[in-house]
Image (spheres, grey):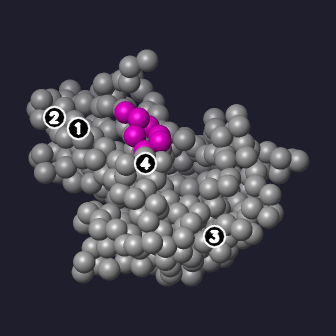
Amino acid sequence: MPYPKRLLSVFVIVFPVFVTVLIRPGDVSAELPQYADTRPLMGTLVSMTVEGPRRDVLEQGVNDAYREMSRLSDMMNHYNPDSVVSQINRQAGVQPVTVPRELMEVLAMARRVSERSEGAFDITVGSLNVWRFNPENPGMPSPDEIRHALPLVNFRHVILNEKNRTVLLKQYGMRMDLGGIAKLYILDAGMQVLKQRGITHAMINGGGDVVVMGIHQGRPWRIGIRHPRRGDVLLGTVELTQGWVVTSGDYERYFFRDGKRYHHILDPRTGYPTEGPQQVTLVANDIGRVNGYSLAIMVRGVEWGRALIVQTPGLSGLVVDHAGQLWSSPGMEKLWFAAPTPQGH
């Protein structure tokens, strides 16, 4: 079915896999044209909503932004055998690969997150490709398969030469997966294109990670955060005129085996899915404060996550722990509007 080309609401709701927008009668602005488009990209749906005085400028800006995001996605997608990341994986333990500037920036960002989280975030978790989280055809590796793959997970063995712009995976068989770090960089690149086209009011959403600027229909963007165990229930909403709302959770790709949930966020230290929070949501103006850190908190756990959020200037957050209890940082008070959480979930 064709994707909608027009959007008529200010209320974005974060779903486990994608974001939809509620249409509210009477919300349509008569002052500025709006344009919206949704396209498959990076293994999810990426939605873009823009507002401005000229519809032709909006439409062209959106098309240009998608073109740039697609270019970067093709470069960084390890599932694409022609991508630069796939070239790096094939040359693991053999020789360095020269990479574009954008990829080096993403890899440098990943290294900073890995160092700060003491390896809780690690792009070489792609070496644990013995897992399959397709619920229709799940694949759970044997303990021997995990033991065999785990020594290949080590972010310190990603050798970056930023001067020569080369990358080497030190061990043969290592694989990098940039799914936890590249998506926000790519969404940010799309937002930069919109700015270059003179668009000042926009929202880009990629599979539940949202970046906004300006306002929509005369008010801040309203982003609803879904309950991690009940898709029809909101934990609350965040209102922003600039910045990011980034969510990681154990509900995006998972399967059950013997009554236990196995999800796609793997602990680089054990090779198995994390057993910490159900969900982590981070809010900040700066991409560097959120990119990769929601995943790191899923691995390191609630206490480490709370300390990180409180100690990082400009970062706010919500953490739903393993038992379903919600914690919010002091900085969320100005942004967060809580909704009643049903009992027993």
Query: In the picture shown, does residue 66 fall above or below 242?
Result: above
Q: Residues within 10 Å of mark 1 (few under 14, many from 20)?
A: many
Amino acid at dot 4: Pro
What's the amino acid at mark 3? Pro
Q: Nearer the viewer, mark 3 or mark 1?
A: 3
> Three-letter amino acid code at disc 1?
Val
Name the spot of residue 314 as percent of width and height, x first.
39, 72
Tell me the residue that label 2 is attached to: 60
Q: CA distance from mark 2 to mark 3?
A: 42 Å
Are the residues at dot 4 and dot 3 in contact (C-beta closer than 8 Å)?
no
Residues shaded magenta: 39-45
Residue denoted by label 4: 81
Q: Earlier in the sequence, mark 1 or mark 4?
A: 1
**What residue do we see at 16% from left, 45% from top?**
199
Marks 4 and 3, Cα distance to the nearest angstrom? 24 Å
Tally of numbered tags? 4
- Rendered location of residue 289, percent (x, y): 41, 70
Closest to the camera, between mark 4 and mark 2, is: 4
Residue to which mark 1 is pinned: 62
Q: Is residue 337 above or below residue 95?
A: above
Q: Nearer the viewer, residue 27 or 65?
A: 65
Alpha carbons under labels 3 and 1: distance apart: 37 Å
Q: Which residue is mark 3?
A: 268
| Marker disc for residue 33 | none
Considering only vertical position in the picture, is 58 above or below 281? above
Residue 316 is one of the magenta-drawn residues? no
Question: In the rendered structure, are the residues bearing label 2 and label 1 in contact, judged by CB atoms less than 8 Å apart?
Answer: yes
Could you say which is closer to the camera, residue 234 or residue 198? Answer: 198
Specify which label sits upstream in the sequence, 4 or 2: 2
Question: Nearer the observer, disc 4 or disc 3?
Answer: 4
Q: Are marks 3 and 1 in contact (CB under 8 Å)?
A: no
